[in-house]
Image (cartoon, rainbow, N blue to C red):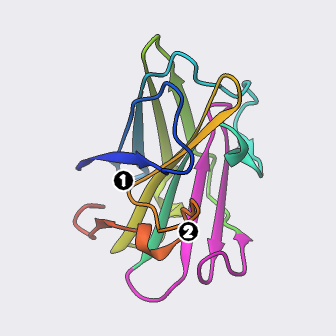
Amino acid sequence: METHALVPHPGHPPLAVSAVEARLVGGDPNWLRLRWRITGAAGLVIPRFAGRGFADGLWRTTCFELFVRPAAGTAYSEFNFSPSERWAAYDFTAPRAEMTRRELPRDPECTLRPGRQVAIFDAAIPRAGLPPAPWAFNLTCVIEEEGGTRSYWALRHPAGDADFHDPACFIGAVSPADMA
C-alpha cells in the first residue's frame, strides 16, 4: 500500500522533527499492520513502557492514530497507539459525537524502534476489530519533543485548529480487495 507524507499543522510546528511518513503496510488475515517513520527524532518524547492494555488520553504525548470511516454515513472509528504499548479505540456517530469505546478481540501490538535521527513505530490491529471495507481513512500522530513542543501530523488538516476528526481529513481509501 502507498506511503503517505503527513503534514504538520501550521499552528503547531515541530521543533526538530522534519518529516513523518505513514502507511498501511498490509498484513495477514488476522492483522492490519501500520508503520510511521519519524525523521529528526533525536528529541522525541517516548512515553514510559506500561504494557499492553487500554488507556484513555494517549494523545496528550507522542501517539500514533488511525481514523476509519466506512463508505456510507458519518460514523467512524478512531484507533490510538502509544509507544508505551497502551492503546485506545473509539466509535463516533458523527464528528466528535456520541463517543463510545470500541471493543477489540485482542490487544493491538505497538512497537517503537527509536534511533538517533529516525524512529519507526509499528502497530498491528486485529482485523476483526476494524469496520468492513470499503472505508476512507486518516493516518495521524501527535509528536511531543523534549521541552514540551507538540506537533500534530495528518494526511490533511482542515482550516483553523488541528482536528483529526474533521471529515475533510479522511483522504486515504481502502477497498475490499486491499483487505483481502
Say which element carries label 1. Answer: loop
| Nearest to the observer: residue 139 or residue 29 | 139
Residue 93 visible in the displayed image: yes
What residue do we see at 43% from left, 67% from top? 169
Badge 1 or badge 2: first in the primary sequence:
1
Say which element carries label 2. Answer: loop
Say the numbered circle drawn on residue 165.
2
Q: Reply above or below: 155 against 39.
A: below
Say the numbered circle drawn on residue 29.
1
What residue do we see at 53% from left, 74% from top? 76
Instruction: Give the percent coordinates (x, y) of residue 116.
Output: 46, 10
Instruction: Give the percent coordinates (x, y) of residue 173.
Output: 30, 67
Q: Reply above or below: 143 against 101.
A: above
Point out the frontmost of discs 1 and 2: 2
Q: Reply above or below: 67 against 120.
A: below
Circle 2 crowding by C-alpha within 10 Å: few under 14, some 14–19, many from 20: many
What residue do we see at 73% from left, 72% from top? 100
Which quarter of the picture shows residue 139? bottom left
**Image: magenta residue range:** 71-100
Instruction: Give the percent coordinates (x, y) of residue 108.
Output: 58, 45
Say the numbered circle drawn on residue 53.
none
